[in-house]
Image (cartoon, rainbow, N blue to C red):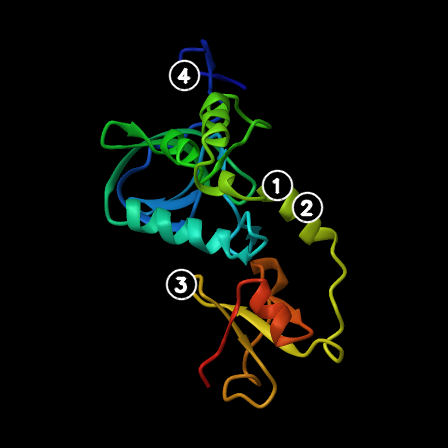
Amino acid sequence: MLRVCAVFVLCLLPQFAAADPNGRIRVIDGDTWDVGGDRVRLFGIDAPEVDQTCQRPNGEVWACGQWVSNYVRKQYDGKSASCTALDTDRYGRIVARCAVGREDAGRVMVSDGLAFAYRRYSMDYDLDEKAAAVNGRGLHGGQFQRPAQFRAAKRTAVQPSRQDCPIKGNISSKGTRIYHVPGQEHYGKTRINPSKGERWFCSEAEAQQAGWRRARR
């Protein structure tokens, strides 16, 4: 985009301009962080959604999305990051490449099998993912659905009726997945927001298999 400067010289304005986020990290989930108060989506990687499940080699279903979020939180929460802003996404987050210490955090996560190379936007971490897959690191040790496919499937899924499936699967502010059954103390005031990954279950077994735990009261 062009504008005319005060001296009538054409000046080229960049299409994207944002300050580079820097500062203390607060992990929201595997690939979304607050860095120095700015909401950042890590560039070139895609981590599992918090409510996503995977399958171990023995067939056991496990809450891999929650596992990744917790692992990344232990690794990076409270540390300092230096990021280079590259874009903004449709949610208003700054898309950035972030370094913690001297390491590219996105590359480390893909190399450790905590996230996937987001090839739709970048091939930067393609070889890192392939090496993780060959060595069975992290998520590559079992069966999984790529996060983008999981999100697409969830958008098109038919939601069960509340009468048939009355159990409420709620996600707390800390990302803990808890289900409430009729008659429990907080069942009545619990609200379900599908856009946040919350959902209704038809049985406790279904909720537990998906990675939710029963509310304590």
Q: Residue 120 in the image: state x and y as whole percent.
A: 60, 28
Q: Answer with mark 3 or mark 4, whichever residue precedes in sequence.
A: 4
Query: Within 10 angstroms of label 4, few (less than 14), some, or many (20 or more) residues?
Result: few
**Which quarter of the picture shows residue 181?**
bottom right
Q: Please report the residue visible at 76 percent of the width from the left and 77 percent of the height from the top.
A: 164
Q: Answer with mark 1 or mark 3, whichever residue precedes in sequence.
A: 1
Helix, strand or loop for disc 1 = helix
| Residue holding disc 2 | 152
Q: Residue 194 in the image: state x and y as whole percent.
A: 63, 62
> What's under tag 2, amino acid-wise?
Ala
Q: Which mark is residue 6?
A: 4
Q: Which mark is residue 1?
A: none
Q: Please report the residue visible at 57 percent of the width from the left and 85 percent of the height from the top.
A: 188
Asked if the residues shown at circle 4 and circle 2 are in contact, with their CB atoms under 8 angstroms apart, the answer is: no
Q: Residue 42 in the image: state x and y as whole percent.
A: 43, 36
The alpha-carbon separation of the residues under discs 3 and 2 comes to: 24 Å
Query: Within 10 angstroms of label 1, few (less than 14), some, or many (20 or more) residues?
Result: some
Asked if the residues shown at circle 1 and circle 2 are in contact, with their CB atoms under 8 angstroms apart, the answer is: yes
Q: Please report the residue visible at 46 percent of the width from the left and 86 percent of the height from the top.
A: 217
The alpha-carbon separation of the residues under discs 1 and 3 comes to: 23 Å
Query: Within 10 angstroms of label 3, few (less than 14), some, or many (20 or more) residues?
Result: few
> What's under tag 4, amino acid-wise?
Ala
| Of 21 and 11, the residue lying toward us | 21
Choose mark 3 or mark 4, whichever is in front: 3
The alpha-carbon separation of the residues under discs 4 and 1 comes to: 47 Å
| Residue holding disc 1 | 148
| Residue holding disc 3 | 174
Quadrant where the N terminus is found in the figure: top right
